[in-house]
Amino acid sequence: MSGSGQAIIRVLFQNIEDGDRRKFEARSNDSATGGGARDLRFRPEDEFLPFFGRMFPHKRYESRTSKGVKSQIEILSGTVTWTEPTGDKSATMEVWPATNARPNECRIARISSFGLYGLIKTDPAGGRSVFMMFQQASSAIRIYFTTETSLRTGNWDPKIKKFAAEWIADGSKSAFLDLQTMERYPRG
Amino acid sequence: MAKAQEILDLLEARRNVLLAGPPGTGKSLLLSEVAQLFESRAYASTPTYDPDADVPIPARPTSSLPGEIGAAAHRKVFRCVLHQSSKYRDFLTGMMPDVRVGQPPGSFRITEGILYRSSEFARRDNHAALIIIDEINRGPTVQVFGGAIVAMEADKRLGIDGKPTPKTQFFDLINPADGEFIEYAFPSRLYILAAMNQADVSVEPLDVAFLRRWTPYNLEPDASILRDYFGLSASPVVALPATPTTAEDVSEAAVQAFQSINTKIALGRGPEFRIGHGVLMAGEARPVNLADALNYFATAWRTLKNHIDEAFFGDVRGTAIILNADRGIAQNPYSLEETSFGDAPRAIINGPATIEAAQIYDLFLALARQAD
């Protein structure tokens, strides 16, 4: 178990709503939004993209043409790990900036390709199902699924528990806490 | 919290600690702090990934609590106050009428007193109990402890594994479970902290054999706490102004008067009859301007004067000496008058029943004045 005992430096939460579950399963059909419907979206981008920029070490650039105007976009990437019943699995995750169609929403691309659907936990009390990512001081990034009930009543670190409680009380869909820079969203 | 930590260290080393000090020296505050520390759950400041825990970023309790106290995963504080009606059965076990709903008339039941409950809690694996007994000299202390008086000593307890040691002292106790007498001993992780005001004129001194079972921790009146509280310099101002212009002038005079009064009480009645610094710290906040300060200390003086009257009850000359009323100081609102009752000489103290805010500074100047 490499990474055991590693200090946590960044935490991300997202409430998994019904539409998001389908994204994990790659059968999102709420609208004809193409591949984007399989992305996990985070807004506001101006808060989340800098956070992802600190979390993911690699960058690559692609050209994009929109309404006849060419521009270059920055795509962040890094290896993420999660635990399945058979053991740990890893894959490369990409974070893309907002599109013109969905401004101010950055996104984790193609979440469906990770095969995480079966790991989503349903809250026994009807609370939030939570997608969670956290980064250790070694830079390793892990994915974890939990529930509102667990975050409220489980044996979580008090800092994580307090932040989760504030996020749930705020009502926003997504949240991050950077324990190195002490930046956070929603802001306390 | 430094004193509270010190007391916890003493409790760990000796199991029974007796906190003593004049009124107003912070005993109650200290008891609360010890209780808070005993039950505290401190956590590591850095969240850390642990793949083997039930959640990936679990709480990691840390503890600066000493020895067996810190080692116990479950800690609980039990609190009680001893009083004239306290009985053995309220503390350990005993018979009492059972007047609970549904019980036939004339029924009895066996009580589980607070010391027994604390002891039972501490007997469980990985458990520790702290019982706080306030005003321990205000009740029939020796009767209340009964046979437990010997068994409470640290080296007379059960071992840390819950088994008797060669020194374990047992005493007879009615078992609440079946009403039979059993041999009972206290567990190692039972900690007893008691508090008392030795100079309380309304209570009897404690039995010496009982006192031997405790490690004393004495609190003293401390003027430096007052200096810190009122934002005064660490050393006294040598020449107090004749008329105050700031809250600090009044506070400085009050602290000097407080010290002078305690010095004289210690000489005239004994150090245990002094009064603690808390008597001047009763307000919500320290005074911020001159008018506030005069009112604040005029109110505090009522309690201080009451303590002097109690400590020197029936001793007019003693009271006059404490008040510097025997020295003909012009601005002192109090003065000693020699008179007679028939042929018998008498002394009376003249002065207002209540000191007004306008008089309090002059009084403090008079009280603080050293012998010429």
Image (spheres, grey):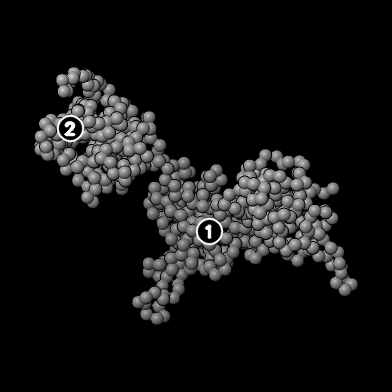
Mark 2 surroundings: few (<14), some (14-19) or many (≥20) residues within 10 A: many
Inspect the image, locate mark 1, and give the three-letter code of the amino acid beneath it: Ile
Inspect the image, locate mark 2, and give the three-letter code of the amino acid beneath it: Asp
Does residue B94 lie above or below A62 as drawn?
below
Subunit ID for the residue under disc 2 = A
Q: Is residue B227 visible?
A: yes
Q: Nearer the viewer, residue B143 or A20?
A: A20
Give left or right: position of A40 versus B104. left
Does residue A128 lie above or below B138 as drawn?
above
Does residue B256 lie above or below A38 as drawn?
below
Give left or right: position of B186 versus B211. left
Q: Which residue sits at x=72%, y=54%? A: B358
How far across and how far down the image is residue B189, in percent? 45, 51
Give left or right: position of B68 versus B29. left
Q: Which residue sits at x=15%, y=20%? A: A68
Q: Nearer the viewer, residue B42 or A11?
A: A11
Q: Is residue B154 visible?
A: no
**Closer to the eye: label 1 or 2:** 2
Q: Nearer the viewer, residue B126 or B263?
A: B263
How far across and how far down the image is residue A10, in percent? 32, 32
Mark 1 surroundings: few (<14), some (14-19) or many (≥20) residues within 10 A: many
Q: Which residue sits at x=75%, y=62%? A: B352
Q: Return the residue found at the far bottom.
A: B105
How far across and how far down the image is residue B45, in percent? 40, 37
Per the image, the residue denoted by label 2 is A39
Subunit ID for the residue under disc 1 = B
Mark 2: secondary structure? loop
Per the image, the residue denoted by label 1 is B133
Mark 1: secondary structure? strand
